[in-house]
Amino acid sequence: MPFDKNAAANYADIQAQRHSTGNCARYVRRAIEHGGVTLTTTHSAKDYGPILESSGFSEVSDVVALQRGDVVVIQPAPGHPHGHMAMFDGHSWVSDFRQRGGTDGFYPGPAYRTARPAFQIYRHE
């Protein structure tokens, strides 16, 4: 079954909470699965890169040309040892909550925006 990025992004939008629940990886994994791709699980969001790649996602080098259904995996920031992941819904980044906009909108909060840890964006073609 091919990946339905619209179904995944719609699911992410519907399930998003008002504020972070600390479960970004679970919310994004479920959105991806709702789009038709089953992922193995891992405890930390920061470890999902290889799992996404083994499930048909590829690294995206052009972060300006984002597409609906793209997934970002962010490495840890101070106080956040598990990192973060979110899905682009075509307008904003969504994880377990709808994140703020802007050029650094995939960073979920001030600790990430200050530290600016490494990240990678993945896309399923």
Image (cartoon, rainbow, N blue to C red):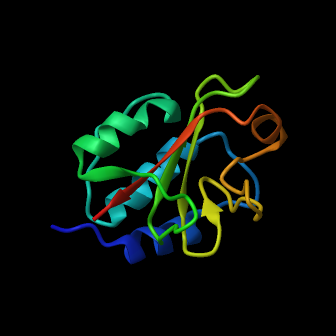
The structure residue drawn at horizontal position 71% and vertical position 57%, both measured from the top left corner, is: 105
Comparing 66 with 22, the one in front is 66
Query: Which quadrant, please, contains the N terminus?
Result: bottom left
Image quadrant in which the C terminus is located: bottom left
24 up-or-down from 89: above or below? above
Which residue does the image show at 26% across and 64% down from the upper left? Answer: 36
Query: Horizontally, is 100 left or right of 120 in the view?
Result: right
Residue 49 location, x and y as percent?
Answer: 39, 38
Q: Position of residue 9 (x, y in %)?
A: 48, 70
Q: Quadrant of residue 17?
A: bottom right
Residue beneath the point at 61% across and 53% down: 96
Is residue 6 toward the left or the right of residue 102 in the image?
left
Pinpoint residue 113: horizontal percent, then vertical percent.
79, 42
- Compared across the picture, whether 59 is left or right of 74 comes to left
Q: Which residue is the extreme one toward the left?
A: 1
- Image: 67 above or below 115: below
Query: Which residue is pictured at 49% across the width and 75% down the height?
Result: 10
Q: Quadrant of residue 69?
A: bottom left
Horizontal relation, residue 33 to residue 104: left or right: left
Q: What is the number of callouts on the image?
A: 0
Nearer-the-camera pick, 16 or 124: 124
